[in-house]
Image (cartoon, rainbow, N blue to C red):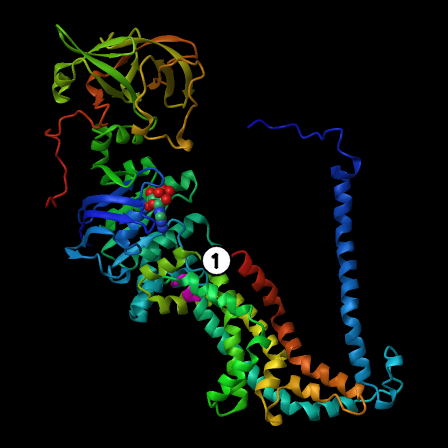
Amino acid sequence: MAEIVINGLTKRYPNGFEAVKDLTLDIGEGELLVLVGPSGCGKTTALRMIAGLEEISDGDLYIGGQRMNDVLEKDRDIAMVFQNYALYPHMTVAQNIAFSLKIARRPRAEIKRRVHETAQLLAIEEMLDRRPKQLSGGQRQRVAMGRAIIRQPQVFLMDEPLSNLDAKLRVQMRGEIDALQKRLAVTTVYVTHDQVEAMTMGDRVAVLRDGKLQQVDTPFQIYERPANLFVASFIGSPPMNLAEAAIKQTKDGLTVSLGEAEIAIPHELAARNSLDAWVGKSVIAGIRPEDIYEVTRKTAKLQAAMQVKIDRVEALGASLLGYFSVDAAAPRAESVSAIPAEEVLSEAPLTGTSGTSFCAIFEPRAMLKIGDTTEVALDLSRLHFFDPETDASLLAEDEPEKKKKPEAKKK
Amino acid sequence: MTATPTTLPASVPARSRPGWRRVKKARAPAIKYTALLIFAVIILMPVYILIVTGFKGVAETDPAHAWALPHLWTTSAWRQAWDQLSPNMMNSLELAIPATILSTVLGCLNGFALSKWRFPGANIVFTFFLFGMFIPYQAVMIPLTELLAKLQFPAQLPRLALAHIIYGIPITTLIFRNYYATIPEDLMESSRMDGAGMLRTLWSVVLPISVPAFVVTMIWQFTSIWNDFLFAVFIITDPSQYPVTVALNNTTGSLVSAYDLQMSAALLASLPTLVVYILLGRYFMRGLMAGALKG
Ligand SMILES: Nc1ncnc2c1ncn2[C@@H]1O[C@H](COP(=O)(O)OP(=O)(O)OP(=O)(O)O)[C@@H](O)[C@H]1O
Ligand SMILES: [Mg+2]
């Protein structure tokens, strides 16, 4: 077990393409760090550089205080779980799991004991004599895990280990891997493009885009305080609603005009985002779907209410998604994350308005139908603001939020 | 996506309607087997003559009655052929077995290095290997014999074996390279992460799943080395060292044509390759498929 310190890690492929750019990360001892980002952002490349399967073009890699750049992969004491498991087809499950120990020339009795311990841990004892092709996807996944954990390595690397499983098994294995990692307390880097996996498993989450690190923080902080438009739109499902909005000064304080609505901003929120500097200018305002409420007779009428026409509803059982158009420009397409096809819950509303489609999570029994007009209120304390030029969050950095940061804070 | 109705347009001729296809499908095996039977007969006709002539006495071997069964069955030609050829058959085995094994092992190592060890310029090297396959034997006969003579190799058979090993390298390398190209890279990397070096990975991970490639290569090499005549006749000067192909050629008498002897000798000489095919043929088919599609 050891901490990983990554400093300015860069990968330049022979064709000149920079897949990972100046990545700097500290991964604490026993921590599970999730590396998340859209397809092609360089997650696998980063992981393979840590593993030693890919040469490091620039920057330094330290594991347990030792510089690893020029250490061979087999001497790094790292175990890796591959996306397609890469089990040895001609070996039984037991032989697959034991392979690394056999190479390390451990005594036969020890190998036998450790194979059984590992199999017990993963509940694959009855399968030890089978070959990989006689196993289901989930069982193969466990064998791949077994092959990694039997070595008791310093570091686990996992590259989308669950992506070949069906949705239900994925949720189950997600929990199992998480529990196992906590129990073994081995420093782990876990790569996924699934933001739900990232949020549920990670001690911390690192969001990567086009080879550049966007933000590293706890899942809670990533969700609550996304550092830029990309993180805001990538993490969360349905994603954060984002639209251009103008900041204005009135006698009562600042307001933000979102479409036709003129919303007064609480002083505290304005101060936190230093909105004074933005008076008379446009920002990108963001609000998560769960922070938009339907105004009913029971709820007190909040000040930030707006009249909206529902374009589309999706009843999910536990909640009801309502889509409506806000007459404001959407942020530039290149600033936000394109929603992966599998997660698109609806196509763009067909009503043909020029505005931006917003989504709100309503009460499941809000009897909303397409075409209904209703009044919605925004939870003002949960508005996000972003610089339309740089995409960066306007939230001041020096906040008393640094509750849980890893101890390793060097450089 | 909207489902399109599955009714056929009226313009489709009746013959290609599904009902027809089913009839055709039922007939397909019959057609296939008839065709196969015809080809089998064409190929087996000379073999028939080979066998019946071998059992005839010299007097009966008249080309005009080649098709007739012998009046008097005799095994004298077989015994004579065996007496005459068995030392040469031993020569051929001594030549073909080690040469096959060595060229296959070399092909395996080359193929592994060229597809999985990816050194800079691997593709260029492989291209040169491929060129090697297209050089006709005849073009290199003279330089080759001169080179081998200069090597001062003690015995003649090892000299011939060396020529075959070197000439086998392009094809064996090609077969192994293409087979190894189908082995997923992750498997190799997984083994590397497990702590195995390149040679250990080759031994413990790659070789055990290379059986099909070995079978294909060994059948190929054994057959072409056993059947070779040209190299042998150039390189071997000592008649006691002749492989069976050269000895077979020498059964052709200069005065009378002893057809019975020639036929039985030819069949005897081709038996070992036949045995190899029958024993490994199943793997041969499977091996070719495995190489072409997936490990
Ligand atoms: N050998 C290579 N040569 C050149 N470019 C490469 C090479 N391998 C990968 N790339 C590029 O580097 C980028 C990052 O690739 P990588 O495999 O790390 O992405 P990823 O984040 O793992 O994506 P995914 O989620 O699809 O697995 C991609 O744009 C890819 O095209
Ligand atoms: Mg990847």
**Magenta stretch, residue numbers:** B112-117
Q: Position of residue A213 (x, y in %)?
A: 24, 39
> Is residue A88 something that shows in the picture?
yes
User: Badge 1 local density, few (<14 within 10 Å), some, or many (20+)?
Assistant: some
Secondary structure character of the magenta stretch overall = helix
Please give the chain letter of the residue carrying mark 1: B
Using residue A152 as the reference point, say whether residue B119 is left or right of it. right
Using residue A297 as the reference point, say whether residue B228 is left or right of it. right
Using residue A17 as the reference point, say whether residue B75 is left or right of it. right
Tag 1 secondary structure: loop
- Vertical arrangement, residue A372 with respect to residue B225, above or below: above
Q: Which amino acid type is marked by label 1?
A: Thr
Residue beneath the point at 79% across and 67% down: B41
Q: Is mark 1 within 8 Å of ligand 1?
A: no
Q: Position of residue B285 (x, y in %)?
A: 61, 64
- Vertical arrangement, residue B154 with respect to residue A256, above or below: below
Residue beneath the point at 19% across and 18% down: A381
Q: Position of residue A356 (x, y in %)?
A: 35, 17
Is residue A281 magenta-colored? no
Residue A246 versus residue B213: which sits nearer the camera?
A246
Q: Which residue is mark 1?
A: B182
Q: Quadrant of the N terminus of chain A?
A: bottom left
Q: Quadrant of residue A368?
A: top left
